[in-house]
Image (tube, grey):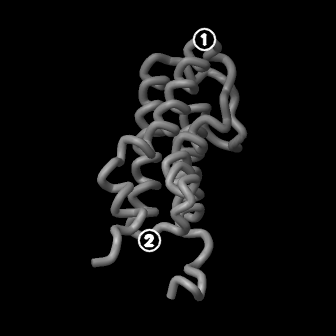
Amino acid sequence: MAPPSPEREAAHRPGKVLYLSLGLGLLWIFLAFNRPETTYHLGPPLVAAAVALSHRSTGSGPLSYPAAAGAAVSGLINALFATGILAFNDKLLGGSLLPFGDATVEALVFAVGGAIAGFVIGIWGGRSRAEE
């Protein structure tokens, strides 16, 4: 019987790979509550990509497409949840880097971009010939 894959092992302990995303989300919320007029442009994409980054930092190699998609969606949910908390409390009052919308729209767009980047990070690098 083959040993379980790193992805299967990670699936049995999903909370551990969410810690970085959760921690970055809480940091972003804390900073935005203290300075709502400042836009933390890297907050949403980092929170969204953090789950895939956590998976890859374990040295498990590239994730399968479903595992990378799951990591991307988990990070996106965290980023959207943090965005919702900040928007509901009127703490996204800073400027936007986008030519349209305000800081809330920017946070939503950047969170989706971070999730896409997280998916790409998750699948980056194919299997080596030795693994085939």
**x, y percentage for residue 29?**
53, 23
The residue located at (34%, 63%) in the rendering is 8
* Disc 2 residue type (three-letter): Ser
x then y, percent, for residue 34? 60, 11
Task: Kindly indicate the quadrant of the structure image that contains residue 121.
Answer: bottom right
Residue type at mark 1 is Asn
Q: Position of residue 11 (x, y in %)?
A: 33, 56
Q: Residue furthest top?
A: 34
Mark 1 vs mark 2: which is more N-terminal?
1
Dot 1, crowdedness within 10 Å: few (<14), some or many (≥20)? Answer: few
In the rendered structure, the answer to whether residue 110 lies left or right of residue 21 reads: right
In-image side of 2 versus 78 (left or right): left
Identify the disc placed on residue 34.
1
The one of 119 and 109 positioned closer to us in this rendering: 119
Q: Within the image, what quadrant is residue 41 found in?
A: top right
Task: Say which of 48 and 89 sits in front.
Answer: 48
The residue depicted at 59 percent of the width and 88 percent of the height is 129
- Above or below, 81 relative to 67: above
Q: Which residue is mark 2?
A: 64
